[in-house]
Image (cartoon, grey):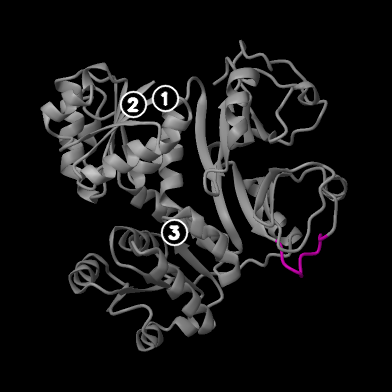
């Protein structure tokens, strides 16, 4: 597929990186010539420097011969105009726009199918807000993702010394589980190395385990791994921009029992947040200032969520909250290489907005019935949902006979409306929705050789 990515900031860069790595013909446009040069030197892409919303720049980038355009600049207005040009002037078939302002996100008439200037809207800020709320719903999971239309969930659990199933082989764990418990370990990260789980693997302290579970079994899974549930009644948010404001708004709309305070360093942003919120207290100050943290009541908070645009500030404010006794912290991290520091620093969970956004784009680029794509870690692996068609080579095959690469496995199956635990003799049927874990290098093998006709 020929793809034009407009805007090579953090989101655009990651999108271009992944799409080019998957063999797509990618071109990038950015007003910053240095960013374009860095992209062409580092990634397998071509680039043009200039305003993406200028027709002449689009022509230079070859827009007349593009299958998909992704407008991911920092300006909503530029992204909207770019998609309109793509539709009206160049006839580009598929158009994606990144939008941040709620006003545009609420204007659903802009994106009606008969208007067609935008086929897909991506909002990293909105998606990050949803991801944070999911983390708050399931504390002690450092990662989580809803799957199968909300009927199942992927959980990332870090095992500590109190975990009751340490040193237990996975095959033995499966034997001990009740038959009605739909749970499957799909991956383990040990000493920084991520790999697909095998029945012979034992679980050790400090392992990070990715678990697939039916939604009704999540609480029992947390108990099984020694993770106690905890009500979040007092939350401190560091950062009152789009993300922090969005989180506070959703909490206000969903619960009157949760008390929220926001710490925002910029006065204008703080005033804007205060005007748009009803019950949330907004404090103007530095979240690393002990006096501000005390005023926000971090010592009594159930959680601190740091979502500024500065990774280091997010990490440091989370660490400082820990010293005040805050039991749970979540940090927004744009640089995925910093994720390895989360556990040593005592930060419970982190969220990478680029990974969330890229997953949505990859779902659109992939062929066939791919329902969702979720990136794990620094794009080391994917969890994808695929609907099996009757033409698929695996239709009718027993799971044990499918020639999966070593780094891939089926984590769960939805058959009709039921979540089914995979086992060796179970035969795949057309219409089944599979959740597949695959290491990054094994994704093409899964697509091309195993589910060739299904995705």
Q: Position of residue 191 (x, y in %)?
A: 69, 57
Looking at the rendering, the stretch of residues picked out in magenta corresponds to: 159-166
Which badge, 3 or 2, comes first in the chain's sequence? Answer: 2
- First in sequence: mark 1 or mark 3? 1
Q: Is residue 88 left or right of residue 432?
A: left
Q: Position of residue 73 (x, y in %)?
A: 24, 43
Name the residue tied to disc 2.
Answer: 3
The residue identified by callout 3 is 333
Neighbour tally class for label 1: few under 14, some 14-19, many 20 plus, Cα within 10 Å = some
Of helix, strand and loop, which one carries label 3? loop
- Tally the marks: 3
The tag on residue 49 is none
> Can residue 234 be seen from the camera position used here?
no
Label 2 crowd (10 A; few <14 / some 14-19 / many >=20):
many
Which is nearer the eye, 176 or 418?
A: 176
Quarter of the image where the N terminus is located: top left
Which circle's residue, 1 or 2, is located before the other in the chain? Answer: 2
> What mark, if any, has residue 24 been given in the picture?
1
Q: Secondary structure at mark 2?
A: strand
């Amino acid at each position: 597929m020929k793809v034009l990515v407009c805007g090579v900031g953090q989101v655009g860069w990651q999108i271009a990186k992944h799409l080019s790595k998957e063999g797509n013909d990618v071109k990038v446009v950015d007003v910053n010539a240095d960013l374009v040069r860095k992209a062409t030197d580092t990634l397998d892409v071509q680039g043009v420097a200039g305003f993406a919303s200028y027709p002449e720049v689009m022509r230079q980038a070859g827009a007349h011969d593009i299958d998909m355009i992704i407008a991911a600049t920092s300006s909503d207005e530029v992204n909207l105009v770019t998609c309109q040009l793509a539709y009206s002037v160049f006839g580009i078939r598929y158009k994606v726009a990144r939008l941040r302002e709620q006003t545009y996100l609420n204007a659903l008439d802009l994106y009606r199918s008969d208007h067609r200037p935008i086929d897909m809207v991506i909002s990293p800020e909105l998606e990050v807000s949803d991801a944070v709320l999911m983390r708050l719903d399931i504390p002690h999971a450092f990662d989580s993702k809803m799957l199968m239309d909300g009927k199942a969930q992927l959980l990332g659990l870090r095992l500590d010394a109190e975990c009751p199933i340490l040193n237990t082989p996975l095959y033995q764990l499966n034997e001990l589980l009740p038959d009605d418990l739909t749970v499957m370990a799909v991956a383990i990260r040990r000493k920084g190395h991520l790999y697909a789980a095998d029945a012979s693997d034992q679980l050790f302290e400090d392992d990070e385990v990715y678990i697939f579970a039916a939604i009704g079994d999540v609480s029992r899974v947390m108990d099984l791994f020694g993770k106690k549930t905890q009500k979040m009644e007092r939350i401190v948010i560091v950062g009152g921009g789009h993300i922090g404001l969005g989180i506070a708004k959703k909490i206000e709309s969903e619960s009157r029992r949760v008390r929220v305070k926001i710490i925002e360093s910029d006065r204008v942003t703080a005033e804007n947040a205060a005007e748009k919120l009803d019950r949330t207290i907004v404090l103007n100050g530095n979240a690393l200032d002990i006096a501000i943290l005390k005023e926000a009541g971090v010592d009594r908070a159930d959680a601190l969520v740091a979502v500024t645009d500065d990774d280091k500030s997010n990490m440091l404010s989370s660490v400082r909250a820990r010293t005040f006794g805050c039991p749970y912290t979540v940090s927004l991290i744009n640089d995925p290489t910093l994720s390895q520091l989360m556990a040593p620093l005592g930060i419970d969970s982190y969220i990478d907005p680029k990974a969330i956004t890229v997953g949505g784009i990859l779902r659109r680029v992939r062929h066939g019935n791919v329902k969702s794509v979720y990136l794990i870690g620094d794009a080391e692996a994917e969890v994808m949902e695929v609907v099996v068609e009757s033409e698929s080579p695996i239709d009718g095959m027993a799971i044990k006979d499918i020639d999966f690469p070593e780094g891939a496995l089926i984590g769960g199956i939805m058959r009709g409306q039921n979540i089914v635990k995979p086992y060796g003799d179970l035969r795949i049927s057309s219409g089944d929705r599979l959740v597949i874990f695959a290491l990054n290098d094994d994704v093409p093998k899964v697509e091309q050789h195993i589910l060739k006709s299904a995705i």
